[in-house]
Structures are given as C-alpha cells and as structure tokens.
Amino acid sequence: MRVFHGFDHLPKFQSPAATVGSYDGVHGGHRILLDRIKREAARAGGESIVLTFDPHPRITLGTQEGMRLLSSLEEKIYLLDRLGIDNLIVIPFDRAFSRTPAQVFVQEYLIGKVGVRNFVVGFNHRFGSNKEGDFEQLQQWHQRFGFQVTRIDEHDIDSERVSSTVIRNLILSGEMGKAARMLTHPYLVIGRMGADGTISLEEPNKLLPPSGQYRVCLNDSPQTLQISPGGRLHPEGATPAVGEKVFLTF
C-alpha cells in the first residue's frame, strides 16, 4: 500500500474508487466500505484509495474531551495494508482544514487532486465545515463533477450497530472478546520494548483496557500481559530486545 501525506505530491491515479473518514479501529462496519471500494476499483481496472485524517478531527477540534483512539496512525496503516487497500492519503487535519466547505472538498480535493471516479460513503457520513456535506448533496454534485456515489447501509454484529464508540466502550469495560468481534480482528496495540521491561506507546491518546492480566499475542506468540493502574504494559514472559517494535493483539 502506498501512503501519501497531504495532497501536494500525488500521482495520477487510475480510475480511483475512494472513501474518506477517520477509520478509527478499522472495524467491521468500515470493512464493508473498504470491500466495496476494492470491488469498484477492480471492476474499473483502477485503484482503491482511503483518505483519512491525522490527528483525529475530534482531538483537533476538542469536541470530545479525553477521547482515546482505537488506532494510532501506524496501526491504521498496518490494518489497511493487510486488507489490500492500494493507496492511503493522510490528510493533516488542523482547524484551517476543518473550515473547508463541503463543495470545495469535493471539487478541489476529491476531483481536482485525487480524480475520484467512484466515491463510497457510510450511512451517516457527513463532511466539510460544520459537517454541512452529506449523501444527498453528493447525489446532487455527482453529475456535475462526473463521479459515482454509493452509500453503504448500517452494519450490525451480535444484533448491535457497529461503531467506534461502541467498541471503545467495550474495551473500557474489558470486554476484549466482544470488541474483537466488532472489529473483526483482534485489538491491536503497536509499541516498542523498553529497557525497564515495559512496552512504550508513541500515541498518547491510545485506548487501553482496564488494569489487570490479559492473554495476548506478542509478535504472534501467546503471552500474558499485565496492565498496571497507570497504564504500563508489562509482558510476563519472554520479551523482544530493547527498542524492538512490538505487536500486541488482544
């Protein structure tokens, strides 16, 4: 998967099918959209593209105090790559970009910079300044700007709507098995092994389950992990070398 930061040095994409969103957790609902853009791209002999934001818009705008993330940018890149997405565009999200009108985002960025041919959105997707853009507006614009637009319906697992918020609450409650079912993959934490025998995280807003003992896989090997009340991650078995990257899955 190719990763681009911003819009300044993008190549000319071949018949791109794209979607845009925070994609925090890359969960089961997200996968429906991602599978659709891959199918649309394959049908047109083109490329799949995900546009995401860093930092998360709610963190930049301060709309959710104390928000914790299901995925750091590194984790999101890892998960999207494993799903076979061709291209990821990481949009630096600051307050200036948040004021971009919906039509400007479509006309100047999706069409002008990316050249999108098929745009896939979720059932409740809103975008642009003050979330003014929605599916109905996209339907009005698609003929004018020459692209197709598709909306994906709400997705349920275990008779419950899948959302990043629902999954955050499950993890906060320590319900890691149910969280993994909603995610459709084990909960992923990427860090580095510290000299003190704990795993350090580069993302300060990463969500961790409550303190306690957990059965995890550490770099694909079964392991017991102790999480302290202060959020320190201490593997109880054999550990990688100091400074080595660590992949934890719950």
Image (cartoon, rainbow, N blue to C red):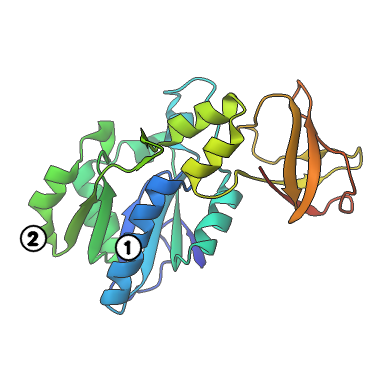
Q: Closer to the camera, 181 or 21? A: 181
Rendered location of residue 230, percent (x, y): 76, 22
Q: Closer to the camera, 109 or 217? A: 217
Check the picture and name the quadrant holding the C terminus: top right
Rendered location of residue 27, percent (x, y): 46, 46
Which residue lies under the disc numbered 1? Answer: 37
Viewer can see residue 23: yes
Q: What is the three-letter code of the residue carrying label 2?
A: Gln
> How many angstroms separate mark 2 from mark 1 (CA)?
19 Å
Q: What is the three-letter code of the residue carrying label 1?
A: Ile
Q: Residue at x 47, y 67 (%)?
A: 84
Q: Closer to the camera, 89 or 33? A: 33
Along the horizontal axis of the image, is 137 left or right of 104? left
The answer to which image quadrant residue 244 occupies is bottom right
Viewer can see residue 25: no
Q: Which tag, 2 or 1, sits closer to the chain's start?
A: 1
In the rendered image, the residue lying farthest to the front is 158
Q: Mark 1: which secondary structure? A: helix
Q: Residue at x 89, y 50 (%)?
A: 242
State the mark number for residue 143.
2
Q: Closer to the camera, 142 or 218? A: 218
Q: Mark 2: which secondary structure? A: helix
Along the horizontal axis of the image, is 124 left or right of 191? left
In the rendered image, the residue lying farthest to the bottom is 45
How many marks are shown on the rendered structure?
Answer: 2
Along the horizontal axis of the image, is 99 left or right of 237? left
The mark lying in front, picked from 2 and 1, is 1
Q: Residue at x 31, y 61 (%)?
A: 36
Please report contact status of discs 2 and 1: CB closer than 8 Å, yes or no. no
Rendered location of residue 160, percent (x, y): 37, 33
Q: Residues within 10 Å of mark 2 (few under 14, many from 20)?
A: few
> On screen, 64 above or below 56?
above
